[in-house]
Image (cartoon, helix red, strand yellow):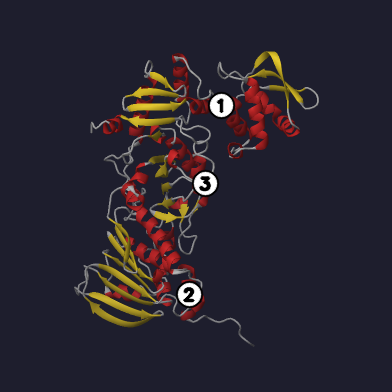
Amino acid sequence: MTRRIHILPDTVANQIAAGEAVERPASVVKELVENALDALATQVDVVIERGGKQRIRVSDNGTGMSREDALLCFDRHATSKISVVSDLEGVGTLGFRGEALSSIVAVSRTTVETFDADEASGVGTRVATDAGRITAIDDFPRQRGTTVEVRNLFFNAPARAKFLKAVGPETRVISEALTGLALANPNVAFSFSSNGKVLLELAATGEVSTRIGQLWGNEKASSLLVVTNSEAGLELRGLVQRPDQVKSGIRRGYLFVNGRPFRATSLLRAGDRGYRTTIPVGGRPWMFLYLTVPGEGVDVNVHPAKAEVRFRDQNRVESLIEEAVKSALSTEESSATFDTQLTPPPKTEGSVSALKSADDSVPQAQMAFLIPGVEEVEAEEAEGFHELASVRQRLWQALDTYIIAETRDGLLIIDQHSAHERILFQRLMDAFETGGEEGQRLLFPLTIRLTELELACIEELSSLFLRTGFEVEGFGGETVIIRTAPNPHPYFDAERAFREMVHELTHGSELVRSARNQHERIAMTFACKTAIKAGQKLSELEMQELFDQLFATELPHHDVHGRPTVVRLSTEELGRKFGRS
């Protein structure tokens, strides 16, 4: 009988495993740097040549290995991270499969130099391999830590090598992988060089905001807002971009769970939902979100390269993120500012350094994140509300368009049209939940001629128009009659507002297309077309009412188009402009 089933040779099995764990040079760098972080390194240096295809060298000052461990580490499933199946639940290290190094050496020529300060011999070890075969073992004097040098990646797997990209793209992917690990571990110093050129040089720091400043500049870091939320064992701390800084270009979106970088488009979309009606259509806000989840609530073992994770309750995590972002956008700090020297996100003595869970199973080498305690944040928000509520008799109208308010910390400049948009939008959305707004019966009903498309729009949305305050009836042909209309302010032109609403709803603007549902679509359009216009002179009482109503909304600092309603000008910035500081 012919036997068809056979056991693969180790060399073939190792190359197959390498195909799962080692996709490209960036995979090698990620695995080796994660090992360095698990070894409690405080300095990690990465050097590559030709995009990592010719040479990758990762050095650290971590715990290092004894000679026995240095020889054992090349075997498949050799690991110091887990021992039994139950260890996989809530695994507290970045690497744990025991496949990475064996997979790397199977498709390269690799040298490991290491020294454990506790080694009795007092000397380090150097092990050389060729396609997974150990070719040399030597004593090697060096300081504590480990250096792994990988040369000629995929030299014995040409089918894999031909799928690698050019030097530039491969270098960028490595840089991106290192960026994620550096953001997860701001208390670790990193350097990255390519073909002799230094691309990253990051000193150790205690704060995520400082690490972001190191990577993209202090101006970007200073325009981020702290987000925080917790619920039933889940905790979120992070930084998100202030709405007026959000652009439609490149998004910096980084996610971490228990100190581990991972990818999840759905969670970034949840953050985007928190920005609803505060940024322009197409805006892509930067987000740096750090989740702490109990071990049983997340599975980090679902992806060969550990790039993705699975949450036990995905919906709850998404809701946690959306609510946290929306809450951050309700604060005064989320408003636009004239200040040219911005301060970093707030700090406090209380740090959630390492974000350890109750069982202390989260990796040691993780982020330190300094933010105010919840009680402090609530106290500051309450104080800010009382301060804003006490500005009576300190409001002025400029250019018949802007309202200027004096506060303890400087000036607020409010766009009266944008502010009224936000007020009307929230008022109508709230009214929809209780049956809608009551319209006022017109003494002389309005007769309006519309196009066929506009009539179809009215017919489709007639019930919502009624709940908005417009009672509309057909009047024969292409004509409708309006018997009741809302009365949002004394300067309201019902016919003009109705015509503009119908036109926008019929032909569809970006604002209309961005709406989540028909209720939001109507409310956005109504707010836009019925709000007080720029150029309308207001009395002191009208300014005060507008001011009070604005800061009673959920998101007072942004209108429904994603434009600022408020721009801040601090006392410090005024002092700088006049040479007082």
Element on which disc 1 rests: helix
The amino acid marked with disc number 1 is Asp
**Residue 39: x percent and y percent?**
30, 63
* Disc 3 versus disc 2: nearer the observer: 2
**Looking at the image, residue 141 lies above or below residue 359:** below
Residue type at numbered disc 3: Arg
On the image, the x and y values in percent for residue 364 come to 32, 55
Distance from the alpha carbon under mark 2 to that under mark 1: 59 Å
Indicate the amino acid at tag 2: Ala
The residue carrying mark 1 is 430
For residue 53, which quarter of the picture? bottom left
Q: Residues within 10 Å of mark 3 (few under 14, many from 20)?
A: some
Residue at 42% of width from left, 43% of height from top? Answer: 240
Q: Considering depth in this image, is 391 or 537 the residue closer to the camera?
A: 537
Q: Which residue is mark 3?
A: 269
Q: Is residue 41 visible?
A: no
Q: Residues within 10 Å of mark 1 (few under 14, many from 20)?
A: some
**Looking at the rendered structure, which numbered label has been put on residue 105?**
none
Question: Can you identify the residue that label 2 sits on?
Answer: 161
Is disc 2 surrounded by few (<14), some (14 to 19) or many (20+) residues within 10 Å?
Answer: some
Report how far apart the C-alphas of labels 3 and 2 lie in the structure: 35 Å
Q: Quadrant of the image for the C terminus?
A: top left
Q: SS of the residue at dot 3?
A: helix
Residue 333 placed where, x, y %?
38, 34
At mark 2, the secondary structure is helix
